[in-house]
Amino acid sequence: MLLDQLPTEIIHHIASQLLTASSIVNFSLTNRNIHAQISGDDYATFRSFVQRNFPTIRTPPIWKEAACILTTRSRAWDQRAFVAKALIPPTDRLNPLYYGRANGPSIGYAPAIDSYETWDGSRWAQRHEVLVWGAAGRLMMRIKEQHATTWHTHRIGDDHLPQNDILDVRLLRPNQRKARTGEEVIIRRANKQITKLELDHDHHGIQAGTLFDTKSLVAESMDVSHTSKPLLAVCGPECIHVFDGNAHEQIAQPIFTSNTGQDFVYKHRKRCTTFLDSERLAVGIQYLEGHRVAPINVYRITPYGLSSSPEHCLASSSGHILAPGGIRTNTNTIVPLDDVSSLSGRAGDVFLSGWSDGIVRLYDIRAPTHPSIEFLDGVDDGQILSLLPIGHERFLAGSFQNACLKTFDLRMPGAKVYSYLDAGSSPSIVSNPGPITSSREASRSQKQGPVDEAVSRQLNIFLAIRVQCPMRLWQPLPDQQLSSLPRYRGPVYCLSAPSPASPTVYAGVENHVIQLDFISTDDIRKGRQDLSAFGVDLGKGGELEENWIRRRVGGRRVGREMENGDVESQKHFMAQK
């Protein structure tokens, strides 16, 4: 029987056994009959390839383009390749404002960022991406669609004053909003005010909506659940208020309140709050006196309210004892990890936490006595302020100092499923054939040569932009990065990605939001037309690209700063090994 006469099931089975996406494409080009079967049902044949090689990355059912996106991003990670930009709304770029802080030297703001993306069609380019961040007292919003990028700004009076700064932002996803016409975002300001803002698509801009009445509570942290009926949790020193996230009253009252102040002996505050799932709320405690290690408390949420006592009380590896060196230790950020539910029986059982001692700890609720894994960077020991997991493959961590953005690999050594080196592997004849995985590993090792695995699995990116001191609020970075200006050495306050499959990461540093697109130079050379499918925009919509990133791997400098790179008349910096 000829190949093109095989049944459809056999052809799909053959395609599912191919190791690389290029092999599937080449197989489909054998003849028209096979191509028609491979391309049928919107290239559903690529589903097995995506789910086998990237099992923990949630993707839309656009399988052929998802395979292209994920393999390209994986290669960029392996090659240490990315493009960096500073995001600047067009209005602020043309008319920078000259507000200062309290008639004295300018004090910068810490951006709070959130983003998401959805797909409205059968093509990856038919994306709807929303990005919001708090710029001092203003809310910036960018909406990117296939053929348009729009910007919106929400301003209030005296939005340059520190007491009006936006400290937290939470975007409601499309399945969480009652009104499907516009975007909704919940913000927390430094003046303890928590408000829902709504974007009216009838060209009325962003309008103030519901005000959440926290009574006399001093709001220290908040979070919104990801369920279809979102809950808003607002934490204070003595209690936790829970609101209906879809409330549309002018002033919303809490649906229930839990008193948690009796659980603590020392003066404290609730440093961070995160919904692990629809039924559990994790709260990171920070002691304001004494020298003890503060815990992470996990509270149970039921239809009748929030438990007054924590269901789990998680500590660092040193437990509730005096912290080393007499320094109080606490967690700064908490993010749930197993959104795909492959590490445990249910989502929310496993989560990451970034601590003030510079260690990232992974916890499993099923074994809550101590952390399951600890991740430590030997180069930078600053506090961990932000975390961003990418499936179960790796995660990024923002440091308190040196503008350091760290990356860690969550997989065990040798457990990496996909490597771009497999795509370039040529079949060879062996006298004693072994398992497929063995030949793949041998091929990779031949191409890579002797590589220190610890170095290849960890990458530190230093967002060392050159800034003027002091800089005015909302002042864009200069087009030309002058070598005489000092480099930014401050914190990476927050991290966000539109989706686990996105090649884009947003990082918030003082006064600026940096966009990192993990793509390689080969993708840049394909041109702007092909890059649109990746969600990468080479210089439109008021984005100013800068070339100022420096990086280290395993404590060693592995790249040099590049100046005046020109790609399609745009300035880019590519950090590539």
Image (cartoon, rainbow, N blue to C red):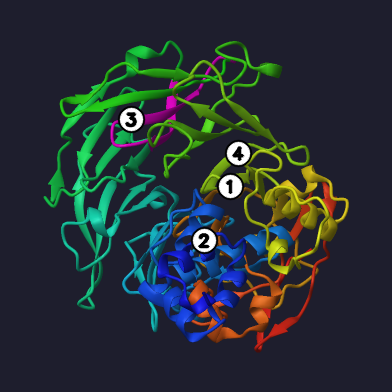
Q: Give the range drawn in magenta.
A: 268-291
The amino acid pointed to by label 4 is Ile
Q: Which of marks 2 and 4 is nearer the N terminus?
A: 2
Q: Mark 2 Cα within 10 Å, few/some/many (few <14, many 20+)? A: some
Quick check: is 79 in the magenta stretch? Answer: no
Q: Disc 2 to disc 4, how far (Cα)?
A: 41 Å
Q: Name the residue under label 1.
A: 393
Q: Mark 4 Cα within 10 Å, few/some/many (few <14, many 20+)? A: many
The amino acid pointed to by label 1 is Glu
Q: Is mark 4 on a helix, strand or loop?
A: strand
Whether pointer 2 and pointer 4 mark residues with C-beta atoms closer than 8 Å, the reply is: no
Farthest front residue in view? 1
Nearest to the observer: residue 154 or residue 258: 258
Farthest bottom residue in view? 569
Marker disc for residue 384: 4
Q: Earlier in the sequence, mark 2 or mark 3?
A: 2
Q: Where is residue 299 in the image (x, y as percent from the top left)?
A: 33, 24
Farthest right residue in view? 450
Q: Is mark 3 on a helix, strand or loop?
A: strand
Q: Which label sits in the foreground, 4 or 3?
A: 3
Q: Mark 3 Cα within 10 Å, few/some/many (few <14, many 20+)? A: many
Image-based side of 300 in relation to 249, left or right: right
Marker disc for residue 16: 2
Q: Which of marks 3 and 1 is nearer the N terminus?
A: 3
Quarter of the image that includes the C terminus: bottom right
Q: Which residue is drawn at 39% across and 80% down?
A: 146
Q: Earlier in the sequence, mark 4 or mark 3?
A: 3
Q: Can you say whether 411 is above or below 246 in the image? A: above
Q: Position of residue 73 (x, y in %)?
A: 60, 63
Nearest to the observer: residue 258 or residue 207: 258
